[in-house]
Image: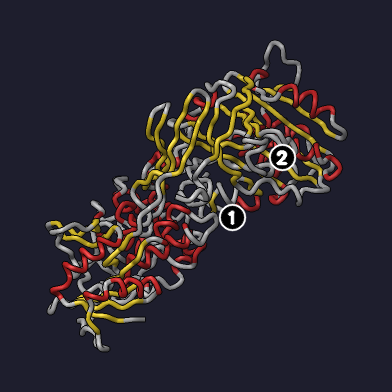
């Protein structure tokens, strides 16, 4: 572990240096919204902002990615793989989002067969986590045991001091050490100091998650589902912003002679998701689809991987137009502290 | 990108296409040299025809057939229609095998009762072929096969001539209603199974067909005294990846593409009824 400091005046130089090493993605302020974007000169980098509107999972699991090209001539067909990826830096990933990436790792990396597309992006990306200093009223990562200012799984841990504008960078892996070596000319010694960050407090929605996943095992037919789904519009925004949602679709684009095959995000909130060619649909209505989404997060994923697939990032609370978010679901299913 | 991408198909050639019924055709497909991959009965493969797309089909040939894979495909959607209209010799994409397959080891030494309806015979045929090729490993074999009409039966000559001629093997055919040239049994499959009064002792029943048929077959078998672990079925779901990641074929925490498609009734009873 090596710790270095970057003074405020060197930040622009750091961004151009990193952008020269590979694609640099970081949180950028655009009006009232913060989004992860590929850096370019003049962007307002948001190191003191609440978590980004959309999670940075797309750096590893893009909204769409082409993985095959086809070429047909007569009866012959030729299939080829997509291009090799450049290396990348994901700078400023909040601890909640990093935890979510670790949840995707279990599905895509640790469960055979390895998802090669995801593995390559993960291997070629250096992840710099950023201590969260400005949680908003919807942030409840504390309920999932996440410390908003530490992320042991990242290559580096960064913390930003809003008063001085300085940045502290501490490597946590060999990749992180290489990162610091590469930027050495911009960095100063940390001399053992740390920023005195104000204590970070996340929301307390009164959830009681002790034994909650197990309690859902025999509640597939629970009457709570008959009420819970009713306000759902089926818009799918919850799955779009959720950092732990990982469902995808595979589609072709092209004509009979040539084209490509890509995968893209899909959503269990849409009717076509499980619609079979013959007409049968095992999850035909919003009730079944709402139940699927919440039980996947709260029971199925934990049953397989031992942990609820939620990191308390608060995005579904901010985005759902009818407030049918995961906190409402947990409460409706009995995961609330007695008051 | 690496060629170990599990979503990346290989090319294969459609050797020939046989018309089975007005809406079902059987395609014989081979890789560069014979089988594109090794598999077991009950497993499936993703077939693709760009730019139409990719869809999952059960392999209907037995792994003891070494020169090609066979797929009996009912025309219901975009990919199945495209497969139906292919000319022999055309190359398609293929990847697999997917799924657990039938428990051929655990079935050894047991009598087998196959109950198929319509296109549902396709996955059973792979297992029937495998058991007949390893005839001494399995006990008495009964095959009940039904379709809406005689014209809707697949693999007719194989069922009537080849299978029915095998030692210690009996074939029972039925159609849903009377037809001029049909002199066999008339009636729905579940009722026929009840009427034939199969005994459960030392037997495993394997069934596949339309969901409504499976539902009543399971009831019929229960009445005949079959225990839940003596009844095996194979499920169908919409799938995109085939490897338990794309998220659409789950029943509770179980993925049909990788943990299934073959389940015993005992296993299914532990899962939510969402299939």
Sooner in the amino-acid sequence: mark 1 or mark 2: 2
Instruction: Look at 57% across and 50% down and name the residue there.
Output: B258
Label 1 neighbourhood size at 10 Å, few (<14), some (14-19), many (20+)? few
Residue B94 location, quadrant: top right
Q: Residue A307 carries which label?
A: none
Could you tell me which chain the residue with mark 2 belongs to? B
Instruction: Look at 49% across and 40% down and name the residue there.
Output: B238
Horizontal relation, residue B219 to residue A253: left or right = right
Horizontal relation, residue B67 to residue A232: left or right = right
Whether residue A179 is visible, yes or no, is yes
Q: Helix, strand, or loop for circle 2? A: loop
Single out the mark in the foreground, 1 or 2. 2
Q: Which of A78 and A59 is in front in this view?
A: A78
Measure how far apart labels 1 and 2 are at the Cα level: 31 Å
Could you tell me which chain the residue with mark 1 belongs to? B
Horizontal relation, residue A7 to residue A339: left or right = left
Q: In this view, does A310 lie above or below A79?
A: below
Whether residue B201 is visible, yes or no, is no
Residue A38 location, quadrant: bottom left
Instruction: Look at 33% across and 60% down and name the residue there.
Output: A88
The residue that label 1 is drawn on is B270
Q: Which mark is residue B63?
A: 2
Find residue A300 and report its horizontal and vertical position in percent.
48, 59
Instruction: Look at 20% across and 63% down and name the residue there.
Output: A16
Label 2 neighbourhood size at 10 Å, few (<14), some (14-19), many (20+)? many
Q: Helix, strand, or loop for circle 1? A: loop
Q: Which of A171 and A244 is in front in this view?
A: A171
Q: In this view, does A178 lie above or below B56?
A: below
Q: Badges 1 and 2: C-beta atoms under 8 Å apart?
A: no
* Number of numbered labels in the structure image: 2
Query: Residue extending furthest front?
Result: A185
Q: Is residue B94 above or below residue A86?
A: above
């Amino acid at each position: 572990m090596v710790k270095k400091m970057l003074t405020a005046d060197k930040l622009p130089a750091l961004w151009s240096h990193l952008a020269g090493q590979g694609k640099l993605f970081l949180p950028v302020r655009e009006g009232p919204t913060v989004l992860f974007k590929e850096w370019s000169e003049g962007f307002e980098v948001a190191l003191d902002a609440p978590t980004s509107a959309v999670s940075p999972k797309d750096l590893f699991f893009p909204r769409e990615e082409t993985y095959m090209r086809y070429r047909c001539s007569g009866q012959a067909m030729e299939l080829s793989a997509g291009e090799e990826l450049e290396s990348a830096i994901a700078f400023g990933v909040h601890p909640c989002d990093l935890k979510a990436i670790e949840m995707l790792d279990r599905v895509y990396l640790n469960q055979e067969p390895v998802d090669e597309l995801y593995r390559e992006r993960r291997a070629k990306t250096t992840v710099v986590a950023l201590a969260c200093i400005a949680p908003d009223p919807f942030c409840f990562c504390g309920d999932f045991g996440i410390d908003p200012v530490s992320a042991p799984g990242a290559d580096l841990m960064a913390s930003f001091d809003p008063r001085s504008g300085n940045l502290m960078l501490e490597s946590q892996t060999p990749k992180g050490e290489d990162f610091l070596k590469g930027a050495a000319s911009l960095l100063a010694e940390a001399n053992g100091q740390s920023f005195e960050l104000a204590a970070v407090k996340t929301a307390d929605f009164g959830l009681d998650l002790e034994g909650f996943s197990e309690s859902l095992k025999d509640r597939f037919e629970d009457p709570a589902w008959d009420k819970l789904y009713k306000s759902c519009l089926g818009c799918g925004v919850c799955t779009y912003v959720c950092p732990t949602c990982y469902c995808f679709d595979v589609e072709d684009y092209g004509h009979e002679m040539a084209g490509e095959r890509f995968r893209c995000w899909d959503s269990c909130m849409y009717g076509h998701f499980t619609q079979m060619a013959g007409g049968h649909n095992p999850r035909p209505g919003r009730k079944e689809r709402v139940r699927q989404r919440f039980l996947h997060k709260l029971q199925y994923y934990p049953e397989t991987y031992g942990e609820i697939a939620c990191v308390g990032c608060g995005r579904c609370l901010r985005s759902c137009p009818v407030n049918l978010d995961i906190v409402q679901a947990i409460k409706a299913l009995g995961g609330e502290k007695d008051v | 990108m690496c060629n170990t991408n599990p979503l990346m198909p290989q090319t294969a050639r459609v050797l020939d296409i046989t018309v089975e019924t007005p809406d079902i055709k059987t395609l014989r497909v081979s890789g560069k040299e014979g089988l594109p991959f090794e598999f077991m009965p009950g497993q499936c493969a993703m077939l693709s025809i760009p730019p139409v797309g990719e869809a999952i089909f059960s392999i209907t040939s037995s792994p003891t057939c070494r020169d090609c894979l066979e797929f009996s495909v009912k025309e219901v959607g975009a990919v199945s229609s495209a497969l139906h209209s292919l000319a022999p010799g055309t190359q398609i994409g293929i990847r697999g095998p997917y799924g657990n397959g039938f428990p051929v080891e655990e079935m050894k030494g047991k009598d087998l009762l196959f109950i198929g309806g319509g296109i549902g015979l396709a996955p059973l045929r792979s297992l029937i072929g495998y058991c007949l090729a390893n005839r001494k490993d399995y006990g008495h074999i009964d095959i009940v096969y039904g379709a809406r009409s005689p014209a809707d039966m697949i693999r007719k000559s194989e069922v009537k001539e080849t299978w029915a001629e095998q030692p210690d093997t009996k074939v029972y055919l039925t159609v849903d209603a009377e037809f001029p040239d049909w002199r066999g049994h008339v009636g729905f499959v579940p009722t026929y199974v009840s009427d034939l009064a199969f005994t459960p002792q030392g037997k495993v029943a394997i069934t596949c067909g339309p969901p409504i048929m499976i539902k009543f077959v399971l009831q019929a078998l229960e009445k005949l005294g079959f225990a839940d672990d003596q009844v095996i079925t194979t499920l169908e779901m919409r799938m995109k990846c085939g490897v338990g990641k794309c998220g659409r074929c789950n029943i509770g925490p179980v993925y049909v593409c990788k943990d299934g498609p073959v389940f015993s009734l005992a296993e299914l009873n532990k899962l939510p009824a969402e299939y």
